[in-house]
C-alpha cells in the first residue's frame, strides 16, 4: 500500500465535511486548508531510486488524494499530468474518493473511454439526499471499478437503487467531540442491502458516539476501527 497526495488542501463541500479531520489537523498547525497547493510528492508514482527502479514497487494499491479531493477545481491545471503517471504505472492500482462526482466527466483524459483498468473510484455519501444526488450521477459513469463510501454516515441510507455496478460498500462513523452519532442498525441495514445484491461490505469504523441496542456509547478515537473489526460483520 502507498499514499500519493499530489496536492493538499480542500474545501468543505457538504454535510459530511463538517468535522473533517483534515481541517482540524491543519487548524492545529496554523495551516489554511482552503489553500490548494501542489506538493513535493507530486511525482511519487514515477520517482526512481539510484538503480533506476521505481520507488513504489509494482503490484501495490496507491491511495490517491486521501487528504484532499482528486476532482477539486483548483487542481484542474495539474490533473492531466497525474493521469499520465497513472497510465505509465499500469502495474499499480490507484484508488481515489470524491464528493465531487458531478465533475467527473470534466476531469478525465481523452482516452478514458470506459475507464482505466487500474483505477477505482469511490463516491462518498453521508446521507440520503447526497446518496440520491451523487449516486444517480455515479451510476451512469464509465468506470471499471466503483466503490461507495458511507463515511461519515450521519443517517440511515438506502442504497438499493445504486448497487448494480458497485464492487464494495464501506461504512463508518464520525470522529469528533461534536460528532453526530452512528446507529449500528444503520450499519446492519446497509450490510443486508449488500448481501441481497452480492456486493462486498466493510464496516470500517465506529463513531465517537455509537448507538447499539438503544444505548449510546462514547468511544476513544483510537478504538473506532478496532471496535468495528470486532463486530466481525464484513462481507
Image (cartoon, rainbow, N blue to C red):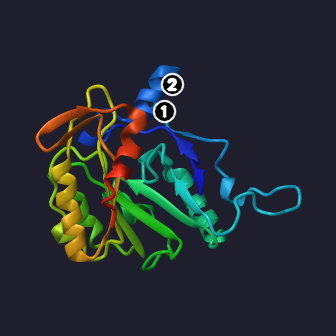
The furthest residue to the right: 51
* Residue found at x 46% / y 57%: 96
Image quarter of residue 62: bottom right
Q: Identify the mark at residue 35; answer none if there is no mark.
A: 1
Residue 174 position (above or below residue 49): above
| Mark 1 or 2, closer to the camera | 2
* Residue found at x 41% / y 45%: 226
- Image location of residue 26, percent across then percent down: 48, 27
Return the residue at label 2.
31
Quarter of the picture containing the C terminus is bottom left
Total marks shown come to 2
* Residue found at x 35% / y 67%: 168
Q: Is residue 32 visible?
A: no
Secondary structure beneath dot 2 equals loop
Secondary structure beneath dot 1 equals loop
Quarter of the picture containing the N terminus is bottom right
Q: Is residue 171 visible?
A: yes
Q: Contact, CB < 8 Å: mark 1 with mark 2?
A: yes
- Image location of residue 24, percent across then percent down: 41, 28
51, 195: nearer the viewer: 195
Amino acid at each position: 500500500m502507498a499514499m500519493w497526495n499530489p496536492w493538499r488542501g480542500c474545501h468543505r463541500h457538504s454535510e459530511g465535511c463538517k468535522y473533517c479531520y483534515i481541517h482540524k489537523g491543519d487548524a492545529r498547525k496554523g495551516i489554511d486548508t482552503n489553500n490548494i497547493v501542489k506538493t513535493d510528492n507530486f511525482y511519487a508514482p514515477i520517482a526512481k531510486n539510484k538503480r533506476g527502479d521505481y520507488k513504489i514497487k509494482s503490484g501495490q494499491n496507491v491511495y490517491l488524494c486521501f487528504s484532499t479531493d482528486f476532482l477539486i477545481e483548483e487542481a484542474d491545471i495539474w490533473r492531466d499530468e497525474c493521469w499520465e503517471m497513472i497510465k505509465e504505472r499500469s502495474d499499480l492500482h490507484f484508488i481515489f474518493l470524491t464528493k465531487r462526482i458531478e465533475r467527473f466527466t470534466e476531469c478525465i483524459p481523452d482516452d478514458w473511454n470506459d475507464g482505466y483498468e487500474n483505477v477505482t473510484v469511490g463516491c462518498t455519501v453521508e446521507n440520503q439526499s447526497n446518496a440520491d444526488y451523487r449516486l444517480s450521477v455515479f451510476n451512469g459513469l464509465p468506470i471499471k471499478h466503483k466503490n461507495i463510501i458511507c463515511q461519515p454516515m450521519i443517517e440511515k441510507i438506502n442504497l438499493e437503487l445504486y448497487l448494480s455496478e458497485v464492487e464494495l460498500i464501506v461504512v463508518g462513523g464520525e470522529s469528533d467531540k461534536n460528532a453526530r452519532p452512528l446507529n449500528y442498525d444503520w450499519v446492519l441495514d446497509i450490510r443486508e442491502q449488500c448481501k441481497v445484491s452480492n456486493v462486498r461490505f466493510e464496516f470500517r469504523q465506529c463513531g465517537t458516539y455509537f448507538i447499539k441496542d438503544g444505548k449510546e456509547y462514547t468511544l476513544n478515537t483510537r478504538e473506532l476501527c478496532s471496535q468495528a473489526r470486532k463486530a466481525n460483520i464484513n462481507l
